[in-house]
């Protein structure tokens, strides 16, 4: 059975108790155990056990995945609760029913002690008084001298209970040879009893077991006689040769055994010596390796310390190393050079533009520098009438490759080129006198663009820069094109 703890975890419970194979018995010699499987999500379990006959319920708490019981005969049911590390119930299994039966040793109260085999060799009936058995008990006649076992062919007056509490008054057995027999009664729990001797008289009837025993005895006797005869003949003819051969064989065997022991002793000594040398070499090699690792670590530590000191002295000698990372800010004026969509809707072709840019120039020669720049321009175009107010807000984001050519000390000519995105936001609001439309409209578009730049860069101080030039952007609007030229001036800081 299965219980769910949460969507990612589950506990699986299963009863072992031998319930799946055969009934349980209540007795000190028959331990009772409930066991289940679990994962690591459960910290503690509670077994809820209910006696179905009395209705009494008991709980057993454990951190293990099993619990041992000592229950009297009755019908029961149980379920297992799982608790997580916070002590909260994480899941519970469904109820499982099982039954505990009474285990008893058979009681042979009375049995017929003298029986007669019928002339036709048929069945013999035995009147008995046997208690504490059930329908699955075994009833067997055993004879040690014949090495035979005969099971009852019929059981009469037997109840249907699985508890070992029933009784029986008559048994039938087939093909029973004359002799002294005992009745052995074995219950399903494994407990058994053996009766006194039962004397069976009548004409001799051999079972298959008896015939096999007699045949084996005859064969064994013949083999013994033949071996005895051959042994006597060999003793008469070859007694002296045999004794001599045995003596020589024993001598060779003793010498060979002595040589083998000596060789094994030498080999063991050599092996021990080789192991000792190998262990010593390994020990010395390990010591050398540890020393070498220690020296290497110390050398690496010393080299690292020297390199750190060298860099510190070099930085102190050279002073601050400028990285040519520049952040600038300024303003410009954007002019719509051409457009196919907005020129009729917005009166002003010019708009003030906010300009922010960051530039990094890692490659340098004696007269030029190379790097890249990211830039932002923001401008707004407006159109007003008696009925509406319209705004077109253009935000340009681009990334460009930068080339600086030195013209004179601290002054550079810059050429830039790259691509980016133009975010156009169109907003229209209507006046209250215009009743055809009252709700405002806001729409945002994203279009790709290419960008170019020509400018003059000035670095009068190591940390202070100025820049003046013009940015050109061509916007690909799908159904229209838009060109904007933005002259600008800005100042910034160099790191």
Image: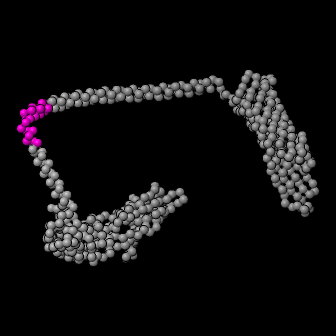
Q: Nearer the viewer, residue 156 or 75?
A: 156
* Residue 105 point in image, percent of width and height: 24, 69
Compared with 232, 66 (above or below) is below
Number of marks in the rendered image: 0
Identity of the residue drawn at 42% across and 58% down: 37
| Residue ranking furthest to the front | 120
> Could you tell me which residue is drawn at 29 percent across and 72 percent down?
134
On-image quarter of the C terminus: top right
Pick the front one: 147 or 225 = 225
* Residue situated in front as seen by the camera: 121 or 370: 121
In the rendering, at what x and y percent does residue 486 appear? Answer: 85, 38
Q: Is residue 234 magenta?
A: yes
Question: Which of the 4 quarters of the picture holds residue 293?
Answer: top left
Q: Residue 338 is drawn in which quadrant?
A: top right
390 with respect to 117 (left or right): right
Q: Position of residue 441 (x, y in %)?
A: 84, 56
316 and 30: which one is in front?
30
Which residues lie in the magenta part?
230-251
Q: Taking the image as drawn, is residue 151 in sight?
A: yes
């Amino acid at each position: 059975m299965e219980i769910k703890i949460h969507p990612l975890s589950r506990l699986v419970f299963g009863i072992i108790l031998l319930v799946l194979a055969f009934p349980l018995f209540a007795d000190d010699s028959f331990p009772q155990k409930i066991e289940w499987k679990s994962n690591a999500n459960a910290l503690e379990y509670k077994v809820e056990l209910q006696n179905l006959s009395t209705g009494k319920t008991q709980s057993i708490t454990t951190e293990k995945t099993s619990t041992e019981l000592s229950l009297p005969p009755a019908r029961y049911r149980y379920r297992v609760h799982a608790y997580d590390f916070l002590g909260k119930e994480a899941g519970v299994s469904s109820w499982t029913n099982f039954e505990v039966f009474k285990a008893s040793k058979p009681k042979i109260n009375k049995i017929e002690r003298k029986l007669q085999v019928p002339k036709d060799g048929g069945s013999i009936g035995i009147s008995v008084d046997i208690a504490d058995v059930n329908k699955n008990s075994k009833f067997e006649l055993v004879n040690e001298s014949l090495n035979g076992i005969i099971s009852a062919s019929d059981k009469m007056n037997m109840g249907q209970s699985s508890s070992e509490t029933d009784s029986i008054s008559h048994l039938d057995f087939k093909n029973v040879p004359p002799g002294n027999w005992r009745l052995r009664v074995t219950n399903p729990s494994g407990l058994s009893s053996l009766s006194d001797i039962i004397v069976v008289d009548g004409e001799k009837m051999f079972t298959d077991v008896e015939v096999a025993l007699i045949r084996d005895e005859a064969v064994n006797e013949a083999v013994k006689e033949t071996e005895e005869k051959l042994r006597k003949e060999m003793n008469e003819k070859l007694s002296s040769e045999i004794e001599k051969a045995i003596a020589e064989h024993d001598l060779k065997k003793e010498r060979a055994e002595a040589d083998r022991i000596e060789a094994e002793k030498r080999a063991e000594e050599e092996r021990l010596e080789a192991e000792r040398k190998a262990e010593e070499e390994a020990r010395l090699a390990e010591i050398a390796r540890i020393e070498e690792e220690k020296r290497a670590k110390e050398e690496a530590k010393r080299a690292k310390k020297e390199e750190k000191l060298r860099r510190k002295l070099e930085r102190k000698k050279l002073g601050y190393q400028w990285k040519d990372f520049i952040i600038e800010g300024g303003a410009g004026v954007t002019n719509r050079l051409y457009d196919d969509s907005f020129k009729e809707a917005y009166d002003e072709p010019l708009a003030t533009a906010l300009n922010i840019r960051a530039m990094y120039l890692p490659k340098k020669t004696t007269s030029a520098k190379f790097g890249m720049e990211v830039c932002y321009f923001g401008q707004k175009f407006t159109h007003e009438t008696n009925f509406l107010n319209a705004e077109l807000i253009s935000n340009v984001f681009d990334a460009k490759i930068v080339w600086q050519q030195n013209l004179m000390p601290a002054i550079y000519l810059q050429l830039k080129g790259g691509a980016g995105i133009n975010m156009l936001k169109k907003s229209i609001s209507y006046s209250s006198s215009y009743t055809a439309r009252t709700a405002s409209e806001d729409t945002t578009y994203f279009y790709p663009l290419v960008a170019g730049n020509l400018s003059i860069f000035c670095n009068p101080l190591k940390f202070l820069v100025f820049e003046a030039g013009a940015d050109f952007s061509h916007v690909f609007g799908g159904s229209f094109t838009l060109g904007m030229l933005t002259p600008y001036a800005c100042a910034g800081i160099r790191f």
